Amino acid sequence: MHLMTSNARVCVIPGDGSAPEAMQASLRILHCLDLPIEWDSVPAGSDLLDLSVPEREALIRERVDNSDTALFGSSDGTTPGAQYLRWGKFTFANVRPICWQPGFRSPLRDPTEIDYVIVRENLEDMYVGVMGDAKGLLEADLIDPRSRVPVGATEGRFAAKIITRPGTEQVARFACELALQRSGRLTVSAKTNMLPATDRWFCEITREITEEYAGVEYEEFIVDDMAHRLVVRPQDIDVLLLPNLYGDILSDLGAGTIGGLGLAPSGCYGHDFAYFESAHGTAPDLTGKGVINPTATLLSAAMMLRHLNLNTAADRLERAIGDVYLSDSDLTPDQGGDATTETFADAVIGAL
């Protein structure tokens, strides 16, 4: 989904911890692209503390609703908005590219062919928030004997995994359309052997949807096998569709294979709205040190520019980032260098 606009409004939410430092450096670079964008920057989380939680939430909602898209830093809960951007805006497809570039410090001997995209269903699965005391479930004798729940147990907790047909169909169609833009190969993975009611059904529905798309090649793996393949045979994957929880976990694994979460962008897409954020968290251990790597935020911004149909600017930004890594200088500590966040930003601006 691309917006066609000559003057887009972008809500910038810097977030918490060290995320605002990455955002500040990224915006300095983005301003050098002379984009047809009106930037609406929300205060960082540390500057919102004088407001009550409801006031913070109202502020974020109003600014998001008045924007075409959002560039979001990570939140530890001080900055609200994550839930609204996701469930309030129904951004059902979380797209997480996993792509190695020369200069990225991958722990793998040969990461050169890693270039795939994880599409993570973003609204359902274990994230629906249905959880609580399992006493009633235990007393109802619903537990499969294979689970080895102690006989007579009366105290326990549960969390529900919920997969729906409409939710699966819409993300499957999104993944099929993305696959057709790439190689046409779609891989789907879940714990199909142990969870037939949910995970196997997710895969069955996806297979049905792929039959509507001539040119899409379908393959399926159990999720633990998939984790193994992402390390030993990542070049075999192009578009990987996963339910919410597995997508969250395996995208971090994928980021590790290319050199870390500081290099991992993401975009969350709905039918009417999309927002973009790095895959990493707030990195509180780096707060105030000025060394957080802004690459993930910048690559997320490049995804945002493509969403706004600013492809030439996105190409320029990605080339400049690539040039800095190719030069093997001015890299942040997570990539083996000693540059600060702002020094890295200066190098990208120089490459532009």
Image: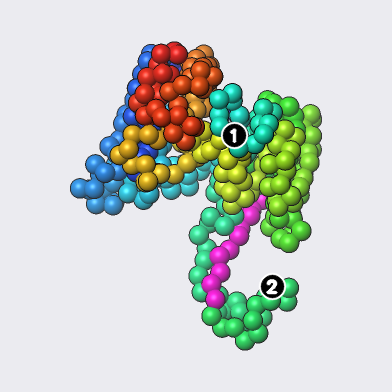
Residue 59 in the image: state x and y as whole percent. Answer: 29, 42
User: Where the C terminus falls, by quadrant?
Assistant: top left
Image vertical order of residue 181 relative to residue 138, above or below: above
213, 307: nearer the viewer: 307
Q: Quadrant of residue 116?
A: top right
Q: Quadrant of residue 62?
A: top left
User: Where the N terminus falls, by quadrant?
Assistant: top right
Q: Mark 2 packing: few (<14 Cα in 10 Å), some, or many (20+)?
A: few
Q: Which residue is mark 2?
A: 147
Tell me which label, 2 or 1, sits earlier in the chain. Answer: 1
Q: Mark 1 packing: few (<14 Cα in 10 Å), some, or many (20+)?
A: some
Give the secondary structure at mark 2: helix
Q: Amino acid at mark 2?
A: Ser
Q: Amino acid at mark 1?
A: Ser
Image vertical order of residue 225 relative to residue 25, above or below: below
32, 86: nearer the viewer: 32
Q: Quadrant of residue 156?
A: bottom right
Image vertical order of residue 198 relative to residue 92, above or below: below
Q: Which residue is mark 1?
A: 106
Give the secondary structure at mark 1: loop
Residue 132 in the image: state x and y as whole percent. Answer: 50, 70
287, 152: nearer the viewer: 287
Q: Which residues are magenta?
A: 156-166
Q: What residue is shown at x 47% (from left), y 41% (from top)? A: 280
Residue 114 in the image: state x and y as whole percent. Answer: 66, 31
Mark 2–mark 1 CB contact (< 8 Å): no
Distance of mark 2 from mark 1, alpha carbons?
Answer: 38 Å
Residue 200 in the image: state x and y as whole percent. Answer: 74, 54
User: Would you say residue 162 sits in the magenta stretch?
Assistant: yes
Residue 121 can be seen in this image: no
Q: What residue is shown at x 33% (from left), y 34% (from top)? A: 290
